[in-house]
Amino acid sequence: EPEVTQTPSHQVTQMGQEVILRCVPISNHLYFYWYRQILGQKVEFLVSFYNNEISEKSEIFDDQFSVERPDGSNFTLKIRSTKLEDSAMYFCASSEVGILFFGPGTRLTVL
Amino acid sequence: AQTVTQSQPEMSVQEAETVTLSCTYDTSENNYYLFWYKQPPSRQMILVIRQEAYKQQNATENRFSVNFQKAAKSFSLKISDSQLGDTAMYFCAAHGSNYQLIWGAGTKLIIKP
């Protein structure tokens, strides 16, 4: 069964560093998403991506964040100048229409 | 504003019992999906069940079923014959615009042996 994959499973970084979280969506899906979940809190929408451009983003998704689909298969989330409060689980999801399938998540720890 | 509300932060039942998790939502979309996702201790997000709003029939997946009341904007999840492996956080979610999901705060479900 096709699935969304994410790498790495756990990323530890120093405050101020840049990180890139990687996702491989399900191959025939057209819509891609990033969500995050700070430990103990609700899941928050970050951004959606369709047709090689951002279709919607939340207020969380400021200039510190960017997304890219560099090669037609990977979907990346870049976080520049990480802050302590960026520590969270980051979930990638993809959908054909309507139903989101989530990857296993990347746990980001900012020290 | 589009919102999803789960009013039960935590629930606990004995193994084999039936448990119902509540969810209410508010969305401006005309046609939308509703979802229940399970998040076990691994923190992975696993789709449990989904409901298309234009379908009147309640969705069922093995031991999991929903009670979808469109007029009341209610979407509860019933787990029958609960098992220890059902212990997890359960999140209700509804479509916002552009198929993004609006999430509830989650219900922690504990199944006791």
Image (cartoon, rainbow, N blue to C red):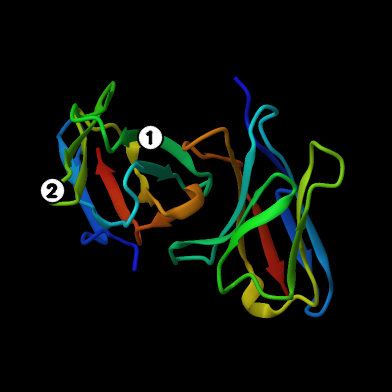
Chain ID of residue with mark 2: B
* Residue drawn at point x = 58 percent, y = 73 percent: A60
* Residue drawn at x 34%, y 63% as measured from the top left: B2
Name the residue tied to disc 1. Answer: B48
Give the chain of mark 1.
B
Residue A109 is left or right of residue B58, and the answer is right
Q: Quadrant of residue A57?
A: bottom right
Query: For mark 2, does the 10 Å Cα neighbourhood hold few (<14), some (14 to 19), or many (20 or more) residues?
Result: few
Of badges 2 and 1, the one in the foreground is 2
Can you give x and y, in whole percent of width and height, for residue B89 in the image?
Answer: 37, 50
Mark 2 lies on residue: B71
In depth, the one of A26 and A19 nearer the eye is A26
Left or right for A63, reference B111: right
Q: Residues within 10 Å of mark 1 (few under 14, many from 20)?
A: some
The answer to which quarter of the image holds residue A86 is bottom right
* Residue A56 image offset from top left, x and y in percent: 58, 59
Nearest the eye: A4 or B15 = A4
Label 1 is placed on what type of residue? Val
The first of marks 2 and 1 along the sequence is: 1
Residue farthest right in this picture: A71
On screen, residue A93 above or below A16: above
Residue at image point 69% right, 67% down: A109
Quadrant for the C terminus of chain A in the image: bottom right
* Amino acid at dot 2: Ala
> Cα distance, mark 2 to mark 1?
23 Å
Percent position (x, y) of residue B108?
Answer: 32, 54
